[in-house]
Image (cartoon, rainbow, N blue to C red):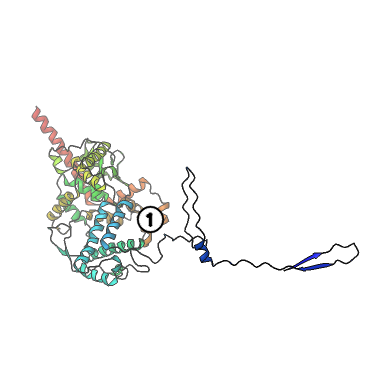
């Protein structure tokens, strides 16, 4: 080592540097790091401070640095293996508790996907949903085409082959199930939905069920075959286009305003019923139907608009005098007594409420409809929905505005935009006036046979009422 020192000299003289050589000290050699770590004593942790929780130290990598923690995020290429029955149950629970789909919709989904479970049980057992590929999807289509099923779902009904529309519905429902499985990572990464490869939309429908629209002659024959209890029901369906389920759930006084001449279709969640599309609407009453309903309702201000047939023979339903709030409280009380306050329990209790209220059941209405069509010589027409098809067709024949048609039928105009059939933003900016809706409906219905037959029905009912009054007065004398 060299050390330099400057000597101090008077000013004006040169500076003399003295250089001294100083021997350097050798550095002590340290043992290797690994042996040093093993020799040195471990530091004891400091005692915890009273009242303060001990902090948990992160693990080290042995060199003084902290070891990186393992991420808990799922891998981009990972998936959760699961069986098809387990995923199906999760999917149905998702519609029940998250999507809040209607119980009828969940029931249809369950019935459609049950065919898939039967296929796995009888034809192609698979352990996991990830093992179901396009080959199995094609086998499933062949399996569906070989099935014999009951059209109405009843066990004792006559069975037939599944129609093409039924096959497509089952396949579309199963495809939706596999979309759910892909979203929740039950399928391998980059695996395609196996039902997409069979192109469901390209499957032809070779055996469609015919849709029959009543002609004027059939309409006249049908209504002429109706008795006094049946006529108001089916005349209302013809002149309003109501769904049968909407008609049997009409209540007094909130759903019928005879003074203003309007019929209101409203959701009744407190009584376990909702409109199919959840879209409430108001329908103007044409004068002929207005007179029929006034004759039917009379002085009643509670209960269903259309009562059971036995009510015309003197039967008084136990809940007929209850108001809306009383009925809702009775529904909750019955479900609590049964010990089931869930959706299924409330739905079961709601059926008993409507029964004790004197309301019609859809099955009863359909049986009455089939009885009349059989008398008219058209037994192949079995669905009351035919009257709704006839109503919409009459609106089309009368050139009723498409927006008003959608409103009267209870459809959402903007919901058809994805298929290119909707009216787009025009529907959002157009607001039909009530008087316009009433005028167009009356113009469309004025030439139908139901109008003249409704006038005759009211006249006969009033004449019978007068004759009954005269007979009672003569007997009193």
User: Which residue lies at the image location 26% right of the left edge and 58% below the top edge?
Assistant: 109
Q: Position of residue 11 (x, y in %)?
A: 90, 62
Q: How many marks?
A: 1
- Residue reaching furthest to the bottom: 135
Q: Position of residue 338 (x, y in %)?
A: 20, 42
Quarter of the image for the C terminus: give it.
top left
Quarter of the image for the N terminus: give it.
bottom right
Q: Position of residue 259 (x, y in %)?
A: 29, 38
> Residue beneath label 1, please?
414
User: Which residue lies at the image location 38% right of the left edge and 61% below the top edge?
Assistant: 418
Instruction: Depth check: give the residue in front, 450 or 306.
Output: 306
Task: Give the quadrant of residue 263.
Answer: top left
Whether residue 294 can be seen here = no
Whether residue 95 can be seen here = yes
**Disc 1 crowd, CA 10 A, few/some/many (<14, 14-19, 20+):** some
Q: Position of residue 138 (x, y in %)?
A: 26, 71
- Residue reaching furthest to the right: 12
Side (left or right) of 147 relative to 71: left
């Amino acid at each position: 080592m060299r050390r330099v020192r400057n000597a101090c000299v008077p000013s004006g003289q040169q500076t003399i540097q003295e250089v001294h050589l100083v021997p350097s000290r050798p550095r002590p050699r340290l043992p290797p790091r690994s042996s040093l770590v093993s020799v040195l004593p471990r530091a004891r942790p400091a005692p915890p401070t009273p009242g303060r929780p001990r902090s948990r130290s992160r693990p080290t990598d042995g060199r003084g640095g902290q070891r990186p923690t393992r991420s808990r995020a799922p891998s981009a290429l990972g998936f959760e293996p699961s069986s098809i029955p387990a995923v199906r149950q999760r999917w149905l629970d998702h519609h029940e508790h998250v999507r809040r789909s209607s119980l009828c919709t969940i029931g249809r989904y369950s019935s459609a996907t049950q065919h898939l479970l039967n296929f796995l049980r009888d034809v192609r057992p698979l352990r996991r949903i990830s093992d179901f590929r396009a080959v199995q999807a094609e086998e499933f289509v062949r399996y569906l085409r070989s099935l014999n099923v009951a059209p109405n779902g009843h066990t004792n009904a006559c069975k037939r082959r599944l129609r093409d529309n039924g096959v497509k519905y089952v396949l579309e429902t199963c495809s939706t199930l596999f979309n759910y499985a892909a979203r929740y990572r039950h399928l391998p990464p980059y695996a395609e939905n196996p039902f997409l490869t069979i192109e469901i939309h390209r499957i032809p429908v070779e055996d469609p069920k015919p849709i029959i629209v009543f002609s004027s002659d059939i309409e006249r024959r049908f209504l002429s075959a109706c008795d006094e209890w049946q006529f108001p029901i089916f005349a209302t369906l013809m002149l309003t286009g109501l769904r049968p389920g909407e008609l049997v759930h009409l209540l007094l006084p909130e759903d019928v305003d005879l003074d203003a001449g309007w019929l209101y279709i409203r959701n009744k969640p407190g009584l376990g019923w909702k409109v199919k599309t959840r879209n409430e609407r108001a329908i103007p009453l044409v004068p002929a139907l207005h007179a029929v309903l006034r004759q039917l309702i009379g002085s009643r201000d509670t209960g269903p608009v259309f009562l059971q047939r036995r009510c015309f023979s003197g039967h008084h339903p136990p809940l007929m005098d209850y108001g809306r709030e009383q009925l809702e409280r009775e529904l909750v009380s019955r479900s609590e007594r049964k010990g089931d306050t869930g959706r299924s329990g409330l739905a079961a209790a709601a059926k008993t409420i409507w029964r004790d209220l004197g309301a019609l059941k859809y099955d009863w209405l359909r049986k009455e409809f089939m009885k009349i069509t059989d008398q008219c010589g058209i037994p192949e027409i079995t669905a009351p929905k035919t009257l709704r098809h006839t109503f919409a067709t009459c609106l089309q024949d009368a050139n009723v505005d498409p927006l008003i048609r959608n409103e009267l039928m209870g459809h959402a105009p903007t919901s058809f935009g994805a298929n290119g059939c909707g009216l787009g933003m025009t529907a959002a900016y157009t607001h039909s006036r009530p008087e316009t809706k009433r005028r167009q409906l009356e113009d469309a219905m004025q030439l139908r046979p139901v109008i003249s037959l409704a006038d005759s029905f009211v006249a006969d009912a009033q004449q019978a009422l007068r004759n009954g009054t005269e007979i009672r007065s003569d007997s009193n004398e």
